[in-house]
Image: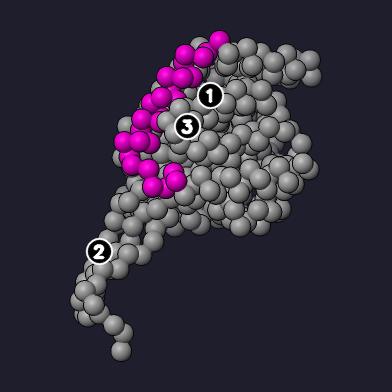
Amino acid sequence: MTIAEQMQTLAVAAQQASRRMATLSTTAKNELLVKMAATLQEHRDFLQQENNKDLQRAKSSGMAAAMLDRLTLTDDRIDAMADGLREVAALPDPVGEVTGMWLRPNGIQVGRQRIPLGVIGIIYESRPNVTADAAGLCLKSGNAVILRGGSEALASNQAIGSLLQQCLVELDLPQAALQVVTTSDRHAVTELLKLEEHIDLIIPRGGEGLIRFVAENSRIPVIKHYKGVCHLYVDAEADTTMAERICMNAKVQRPGVCNAMETLLVHRAIAPIFVPQIVAAMRQAGVEVRGCEAAQGLVADLIPATEADWYEEYLDLTLALRVVADFDQAREHIETYGSLHTEVIVTNNYQCAQRFLREINSSVVMVNASSRFSDGNQLGLGAEIGISTTKLHSFGPMGLEDLTTRKFVVLGDGQVRS
């Protein structure tokens, strides 16, 4: 078969499987996930053997040490995948939940009930654990899932997928409810994105190039998990000790993730005190700080920031710093350069904090807390499939509920419309 025919066959099978998955009881779905967790741990030798094939190819191609580390399936990471599946099994099942019921004057009752989306396609460039994490969330929410990982993890993803499919078969569930695309040919992605009759949603996770490609070529609705140009604004009435602690955590604790701070905005009234303080602390932690002209006037040897720096998601120990005149200029900067991911204000002024919450419309907005809390688990969702920067239909960390939609249910006792 051609790649187009392969993707068509895969999508049709997924759609058929999704109808069965949508009717499964919570008990059956939880049993499946717990079995999947145990199976991954029981076959860790097989997983590491297949993972080693990816690692050898990656080393031969000159992959950087940091990326090799992300690709490696250690015992701890296999255990973490299994634990993640068990955690999803323990979460409340959103499917079937009636989120509202009201009585109309004619006596009919109207409500809305949560149902699975159907078939979800996830296209990702990430660590192999995403295969298990995404599968668990999609299956618990009653969906079928098609997974297309990066070519660098092809053997690892197929190994994980084959073990999870084995669990479906052993529990007499449709194997096609979870499918891993087995080719690294990019043409497979292009063909998948055409299958709007069979696939209900596409979620791309990875670099900016991948997400733009998917968004520009898909006939299927796309929820973009776009880059995280996260800002932290230190207000004139901030506690500088608190601000430093939050800034350091937001930038340094784990710089290579999407919820790390990339740009620091400082009110000019507090800048003469805070800018030298935070630059010294950042430098001590190994962070390269690039500052605007006003910031350079406060720290003599500061690297000048360029226009490109304000748009940058560094994912590294690099920070852009700008002194702003007031709240309005901080908001304008975020609106101009932000990616709708996560924004933070540090302030002791209640009115200013409330303004920030009201006027900044990124997917997560925080007062006096590190941007590193912008995470489904940290926010109480239990697990997430990613952080959506698309306002429809989900915005921010996506948990189980975000992998469902709602239908109207109407209860009557013989009413007819006149």
Residue 167 is at least partly visible in this image: yes
Q: Is residue 254 magenta?
A: no
Scheme of image coloration? one colour
Residue tagged 1: 163
Residue tagged 2: 101
Q: Are marks 3 and 1 in contact (CB under 8 Å)?
A: no
Residue 153, given in percent of the width and then of the height, sits at 66, 25
Q: Secondary structure at mark 3?
A: helix
Q: Quadrant of residue 106?
A: bottom left
Q: Secondary structure at mark 2?
A: strand
Residue occupying image coordinates x 31% and y 36%: 27
User: Which residue range is magenta in the image?
Assistant: 20-45
- Name the amino acid, label 2: Met
Extreme front residue here? 172
Q: How far, Cα to Cα, is label 3 from label 1?
A: 9 Å
Q: Sequence-wise, which precedes: disc 2 or disc 1?
A: 2
Residue tagged 3: 168
**In the displayed structure image, the side of residue 118 where residue 66 appears, left or right:** right
Mark 1 packing: few (<14 Cα in 10 Å), some, or many (20+)? some
Magenta portion: prevailing SS class: helix
- Name the amino acid, label 1: Leu
Q: Sequence-wise, which precedes: disc 3 or disc 1?
A: 1
